[in-house]
Amino acid sequence: MKTTIDLDDKLFKRAKAIAAKRGVSFRALVTEALMRIAAEAPSVSNEPSWMRCFGAFKDSKDETAQIQTTIDADFSRVDVEDWK
């Protein structure tokens, strides 16, 4: 995939120099850097978003499922028109 990014001139020149010193393309250098960052990042979780905020009930899947069911049921009844 192609994309366009804006980089600071000094950062770009330094990265190009590093790539040249390593004997790789700028693209390969950027790809390697992004792969390292992605490998270090926490994996995407299947937990409900509220659980990531509050961390509640991590050891109790049944309670978590019950809470999520309640949340889903309540939010399924929300009418957008009520908030205007």
Image (cartoon, rainbow, N blue to C red):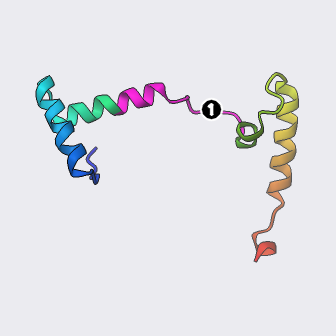
Amino acid bearing label 1:
Ser
**Which residue is more in the foreground, 48 or 40?**
40
**Which residue is more in the foreground, 30 or 78?**
30
Quarter containing the C terminus: bottom right
Query: Eyeballing the image, is 24 above or below 5?
Result: above
| Residue 40 in the image, given as x and y percentages of width and height | 47, 26
Outermost residue toward the front? 10
| Residue 69 in the image, given as x and y percentages of width and height | 84, 41
Query: Eyeballing the image, is 84 above or below 29?
Result: below
Residue found 44% across the figure and 25% down from its top = 39
Report the number of numbered marks: 1
Q: Is residue 23 left or right of residue 33?
A: left
Q: What range is drawn magenta here?
A: 34-48
Query: Eyeballing the image, is 74 above or below 59?
Result: below
Mark 1 crowdedness (10 Å alpha carbons): few <14, some 14-19, many ≥20: few
Quarter containing the N terminus: top left
| Residue 11 in the image, given as x and y percentages of width and height | 24, 44
Residue 38 on the magenta span: yes
Residue position for label 1:
45
Q: Is residue 55 left or right of residue 46?
A: right
**Which residue is more in the foreground, 67 or 11?**
11
